Amino acid sequence: MENILHGPGFLGTAGNFAADMTLIIMILGASIFTYGAYVMVKHDDFNKHKRIQTFGAVLNLIMVLWMMVLPFRDFIVRDNGGPRIPLFYQITMAHAFFGVIAIVIGWFVVLRGHGLVPKFLQFKNWKIWMRGAYSLYMIATLLGIIVYVIWFVVEPNPPTFK
Ligand code: HEM
């Protein structure tokens, strides 16, 4: 498993298999959130919407914890194999910033949807919270795609994983 993940990628960039796979799964994740939003707006089906968005949030969280936290520590905080172009650090930090906020707000809305937050946090203005969470996930995903391009296409000394 480790060998496959750290082996060559399939997108023709300097990214390894794990990075290429993560990119595709995160784009799929953004599509799941978008379909979930569509179900709510077009069909007004809150239960189906809730199931889809919960699945999207779980998939997103698993991928961030599995594939992003350690590279962030190693290549941004510890700067292993650096220094690299300033954009490498700037875009990844902006991405992580929006990513953390998206996860906090996103999970707050998911837990609220499942009746799992204390009474004083039970907001009623669903539209604002759901639109906010959706927008943040989309911003984090777009920044993530830019991160991929900077890390594995633009940066002359791309990170390598051993
Ligand atoms: C809503 C939350 C998030 C989304 C949708 C998201 C999305 C993405 C996407 C699409 C990529 C490109 C695929 C790749 O290069 O592997 C990526 C890469 C990355 N993200 Fe995130 N991300 C999120 C949260 C975070 C957070 C919280 C951190 C910081 C701990 C983070 C750090 C990184 C790093 C370091 C990479 C490059 C990893 C690598 O290629 O090895 N991301 N992200």
Image: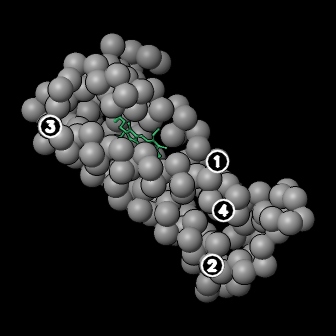
Query: Which of 104 and 62 lies nearest the eye of the viewer?
Result: 104
Task: Identify which residue, 72 or 49, lies in the foreground.
Answer: 72
* Mark 2 and mark 1 residues within 8 Å of each other at the beta carbon: no
At x 62% / y 59%, what residue is drawn? 105
Q: Residue at x 14, y 37 (%)?
A: 85
What amino acid does circle 1 point to?
A: Val
* Side of 72 where 87 appears, left or right: left
In the rendered image, which residue does mark 2 sit on?
A: 128
In the picture, the disc for residue 58 is 1
Real-space Cα separation, disc 3 to disc 1, in angstroms: 33 Å
The part of the image, by quadrant, that contains residue 39 is bottom right
Residue positioned 82% across, 68% down in the render: 122
Horizontal side, residue 31 vs residue 156: left or right: right
Image quarter for ligand 1: top left
From where the camera sits, is residue 156 visible?
A: yes
Q: Residue at x 77, y 57 (%)?
A: 111
CA gap between label 2 and label 1 equals 21 Å
Q: Closer to the observer: label 1 or label 4?
A: 1
- Residue bearing the label numbered 3: 85
Question: Could you classify mark 4 by the number of other residues whose Cα lies within 10 Å: few (under 14), some (14-19), or many (20 or more)?
Answer: some
Q: Is mark 4 within 8 Å of ligand 1?
A: no
Query: What label sits on residue 52 in the rendered view?
Result: 4
Q: Give the residue at the far front of this rendering.
A: 120
Tag 1 secondary structure: helix
